[in-house]
Structures are given as structure tokens and as C-alpha cells.
Amino acid sequence: MPANESKTRLGTPWPADVLLKNRTPTLLMVGAEDERWLVESYAFTDHLRQNKHPDYTWRVIEGVGHNLGPEIEADVTHGEYGVIAKTKVGPINEDVVHAATKWLDQHAKD
């Protein structure tokens, strides 16, 4: 591994470095309401840009959260333990599906 590659806390190469090495076309979609991953995804794409990745797309989808859908509060249950946590869930937003499909169509190889 080149000296300039970062590693995750598990000691594996940072995914952005793997994409740079393989020059893999990349679509990164994040919900605008997902504050943590919004910042992380910006750092990820900034790393790709600074290292001149040839083909990446970063899409921030308004009105959706971490699961790329509406942030509807729900209980996480586990058998006899009942409610063990709270989460936010919702169906994947239609705009996300359309954007992903369009990107895949544009990047499909004949």
C-alpha cells in the first residue's frame, strides 16, 4: 500500500483510496438530513477531487435522511426484550431511485 493511503480504524484501506486506485466510477448519494454522513461524504468526495479521480458524482438529496427516505421515528424491537432503541426509517425516496437509475444508465458499458 502506498504511503499516502489512509487506513480505517480496522486497518483496512480507506474506501476512497480503493476507488482512486481502481479508478472506479462512483456515485455517492447522501440525504441532506443525515448530518453525520453529509459531512463524511463531503470529505470523501473532496479526497477524490484532490486526487483527481476521473469519474465520481456526489448527490445530496433534499428532504431525506440516512436511509435515503423520510425520517419517520420508529421503535427497534427485539423479541422478548421489546423496544430496545429508537430509529428513523422510511421508504427510499423516489428522487433517489430516479437519480441512481439515471447515473447507472449514463455509466452502463455497451
Image (cartoon, rainbow, N blue to C red):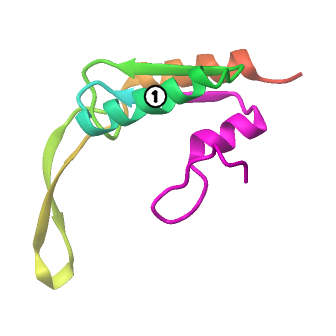
- Magenta region, residue range: 1-27
Seen from the viewer's position, the closer of residues 66 and 56 is 56
**Picture layout, residue 14 above or below residue 59:** below
Q: Residue at x 39, y 30 (%)?
A: 30
- The picture quadrant where one finds residue 94 is top left
- Quadrant of the frame with the N terminus: bottom right
Furthest-front residue in this view: 3
Residue 107 in percent (x, y) is at 73, 20
The residue carrying mark 1 is: 29
Magenta segment includes 19:
yes
Q: Which residue is painted at 70% across and 28% down in the image?
A: 25
| Amino acid carrying mark 1 in the image | Met
Quadrant placement of the C terminus: top right
Nearer to the camera, 56 or 61: 56
Secondary structure, magenta segment, majority class: loop
- State the count of labels: 1
Does the magenta-highlighted stretch encompass residue 15?
yes
1 sits left or right of 46 in the view? right
**Residue 98 in the image: x percent, y percent?**
51, 19
Q: Where residue 14 sits: x, y (%)? A: 56, 48
Q: Residue at horizontal 64%, vertical 25%?
A: 51
Q: x%, y% of residue 23?
A: 75, 31
Query: Residue at horizontal 38%, vertical 36%?
Result: 40
Residue lying furthest right in this view? 110
